[in-house]
Image (spheres, rainbow, N blue to C red):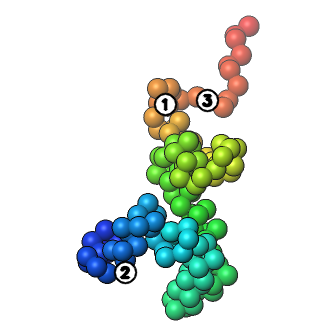
Amino acid sequence: WLAIRDNAPQGSALYRLLAGRGARWLFPAPGAAGHLPRQSFSRLLGQMAVAAGIDPTRVTPHVIRHAFATHLLEGGADLRSIQMLLGHADLGSTEIYTHVLDNRMRDLVLNHHPLADVQTSTDPAPKPAT
């Protein structure tokens, strides 16, 4: 999409959208806001799901948004960046995605912590000889 969007032929409808209000949006549209409204995006997403043989109730803008944030976190993005990308005013709203970090943090600690190679025993300490 970005290759098509960014190389719109001069004089095309997409080129004109990008020359006007739509220039700053990923999905420009001719409406007053200059971008594709969420309702239109939802409708298009549903149509694509049906065409792909997927239940459209399982593919929603919210699901896409959640997957986006989750994959960013799994890929190592910091929470503040994700907050900005999602447009959350409060970091607490973004923190709901941190549940995906549990396995990643466990792996980091077990494999990369300076004491990761130290073997700890779960057996109680031996009793001194009497």
Residue 97 image point, x, y percent:
63, 52
Disc 3, SS: loop
The alpha-carbon separation of the residues under discs 3 and 1 comes to: 18 Å
Q: Are marks 1 and 2 in contact (CB under 8 Å)?
A: no
Single out the mark in the foreground, 2 or 3.
2
> Neighbour class for label 3 at 10 Å: few (<14), some, many (≥20)?
few
Residue occupying image coordinates x 36% and y 74%? 16
Residue 105 seen in render: yes
The alpha-carbon separation of the residues under discs 2 and 3 comes to: 69 Å
Residue placed under numbered mark 1 in the picture: 113
Q: Is residue 57 above or below residue 121?
A: below
The disc, 3 or 1, on the residue closer to the chain's N-terminal end is: 1
Amino acid at circle 1:
His
Single out the mark in the foreground, 1 or 2.
2
Disc 1, SS: loop
Q: Quadrant of residue 33?
A: bottom right
Residue placed under numbered mark 3 in the picture: 121
Disc 2, SS: helix
The disc, 2 or 3, on the residue closer to the chain's N-terminal end is: 2
The alpha-carbon separation of the residues under discs 1 and 2 comes to: 55 Å
Residue occupying image coordinates x 56% and y 42%? 80
Q: Quadrant of residue 23?
A: bottom left
- Closer to the camera in the image, 53 or 83: 83
Disc number at residue 13?
Answer: 2
